[in-house]
Image (tube, rainbow, N blue to C red):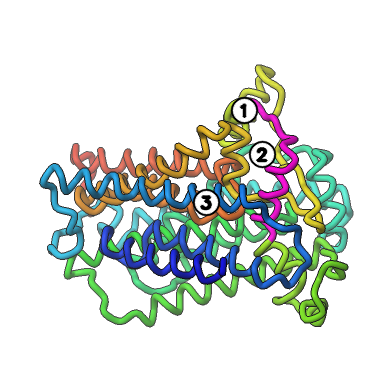
Amino acid sequence: MIILITLLLCFGSIFLGHKLLGKWFNHISIYSLNWTMFIVLYEFRLMNYSIITVHTWMVILFAFVGFILGVLTISFAKQSLGQSTELFKTERKIDFVIFQDNCKLLKRITYITAIIGLIGTIYYWMILINKFGNIAAVLAHGNIVYTMRTKGEIVGGIPYLDSLSFVAIASSAIFTAYKNKLTLIPILPFLGVVLQGIALVGRGGILLALFLFIIMFFLTRHLLNLDKRFRKKDKTNTIIAVVVLLLITITALVGIKVSRGTIENFKASSSSLKKYENSMFISPSIYLYASSDIVVLSKYFEKEMEHPRFGENTFAPIYGILARIKVVEPPDWFQRGYNVPMWSNTATYLREIHADFGYIGLALFPYLLGLVTTFFWFKLYQNLSIIYLLPLSYLMVIISYSTIMMITRLAIWAISLVILIAIFHFFEKAKNKKLFSKSEL
């Protein structure tokens, strides 16, 4: 019954999103598909999970309804003010400075930020090599590296420099959308992110890079399709680009799984799932990652053991900066885990919202997330300003990550956004003031 209700809500909301926003790829479809996948996978019961409480199901449902109401608020407000909500039926001219001279400026931004980010990653690798002796030893002791990192026993590195790799990911996604085909431009920033993920023995940055690239790519394509000069009817190159990036990401995630030495022999696994214990791409641990978060959320509500400071999860980077200057105690960078009955520690963004702001946060945050994301959606496609593309994309990353955690916990999310806004704002201002000519790009 839950699967049927979930699928009906999913398909209904996807059609609603297309009706309201004009495109199939939008924040409603992302939210709906993400949560549907996690719920359906849980309902397959391939592991003997703890039962999700009615209270948790109601929280999930009300958060979804709140998110949809946020979208509807902006749509109805525009209609009541007599403003058109038809965004993609009128042809308009796209004239962004980053697209001038065959995107030369965009390529420079990508290469410079990717190289700087890669330098930060290489420096961290040098720290690991000094501890373990060589690269092979680091890879062989991935589980030890992971444990040391979670306990804060690996110190050093250049703080926040890796954020520039995500600036490069975003700019390379815009470039790829402009070309409408996969080029070598995104390879360097993805290399930096993957090497960083292997060094940290963590998947968070790699998934963030994938979500950011795909979202930025499709939003930019929506934008370029308004101008007949950039319109492409053939979708083949787009499909190839997405598939290649998915394969790179999956391969990197599997490599990290192997390096970490993940346990596959869970007693709670069903007999059908145990058959895949030795599989690289389908295994009990992968099923656990893709279905346990809502169970952990339920266990979190049952225990009520977490009492962080106000906004400590949502604004963790700010607490981190304040901790560096000894103003506050550092936040907990790793979430508390629960046995469900397997140990898992991610519990969707709803856990962080409730822990930070209580039930008022659960009532307001999904609504505001839908409202603000929709606001920037209309701003981008009505005003045609590249600046609106950035907050819209990063808000949609929060939505993409909502079934896992509050992605704003990671400093790379906030820092890369601020850097991107600063860079693009500078060049747009420079264009308006005519500080350079097209030939100088």
The image position of residue 10, as x and y in percent, is: 44, 66
Q: Is residue 394 visible?
A: yes
Question: For the residue marked with disc 3, what is the amino acid?
Answer: Phe
Q: Is residue 271 left or right of residue 307?
A: right
The image position of residue 258, as x and y in percent, is: 79, 68
Question: For the residue marked with disc 1, what is the amino acid?
Answer: Tyr
Decide whether residue 301 is among the magenta residues: yes
What residue lies at 84% left-to-right and 39% top-to-bottom? 153
Mark 2 residue crowding within 10 angstroms, few (<14) / some (14–19) / many (20+) = few
Labels 2 and 1: the sequence-earlier one: 2
Q: Which secondary structure lies at badge 1? A: helix
The image position of residue 115, as x and y in percent, is: 55, 52
Q: How far separated are the C-alphas under marks 3 and 1? A: 21 Å
Which segment did they paint magenta?
292-309
Residue indicated by mark 2: 158
In the image, which disc is placed on residue 166? 3
Q: Is residue 368 left or right of residue 84?
A: right
Closer to the observer: label 3 or label 1? 1
What residue lies at 67% left-to-right and 20% top-to-bottom? 328
Residue indicated by mark 1: 319
What residue lies at 71% left-to-right and 68% top-to-bottom? 286
